[in-house]
Image (tube, rainbow, N blue to C red):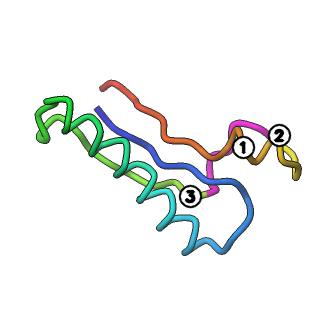
Amino acid sequence: MTIEGHCDERGTREYNLALGERRAAAARDYLLAQGVDPARIRVISYGKERPVAAGSNETSWSKNRRAATVLN
């Protein structure tokens, strides 16, 4: 599985990539604590590059701040 870290549009590219990485790593750490094999988990950060909601308002920003789990 892949855990994708995403951010809203605010912040620099570098900051958001690091934040997305931390967000995805937190989800990974939870799954590891539940007994998931670490070899089955990949973490990637997309920062603000793949928003799910367009707009520059709190509603859009909150939807774009997320960790998504993709089963591959």
- Disc 2 marks a residue whose amino acid type is Thr
Q: Nearer the viewer, mark 3 or mark 2?
A: 2
Quadrant in which the N terminus appears: top left
Residue 47 image offset from top left, x and y in percent: 56, 58
Labelled pair 1, 3 in contact (Cβ < 8 Å): no
* Dot 3: element: strand
**Magenta segment, prevailing SS (helix, strand or loop):** loop
Residue displayed at 23% across by 39% down: 41
| Residue 47: image tag | 3
Residue under pointer 2: 59
- Disc 3 marks a residue whose amino acid type is Gly
Residue displayed at 40% across by 48% down: 24
> Is 5 on the left or on the right of 41, as rendered?
right
- Disc 1 marks a residue whose amino acid type is Ser
Classify 10 Å Cα crowding around label 3: few (below 14), some (14-19), many (20 and above): many
Answer above or below: position of 59 versus 16.
above
Q: CA distance from mark 1 to mark 2?
A: 5 Å
Q: CA distance from mark 3 to mark 2?
A: 18 Å
Tally the marks: 3
Q: In the rendered structure, does residue 52 fall within the stretch colored magenta?
A: yes
Labelled pair 1, 2 in contact (Cβ < 8 Å): yes
Q: Earlier in the sequence, mark 1 or mark 3?
A: 3
* Range drawn in magenta: 48-53
Q: Nearer the viewer, mark 1 or mark 3?
A: 1
Q: Residue extending furthest front?
A: 33
* Dot 2: element: helix
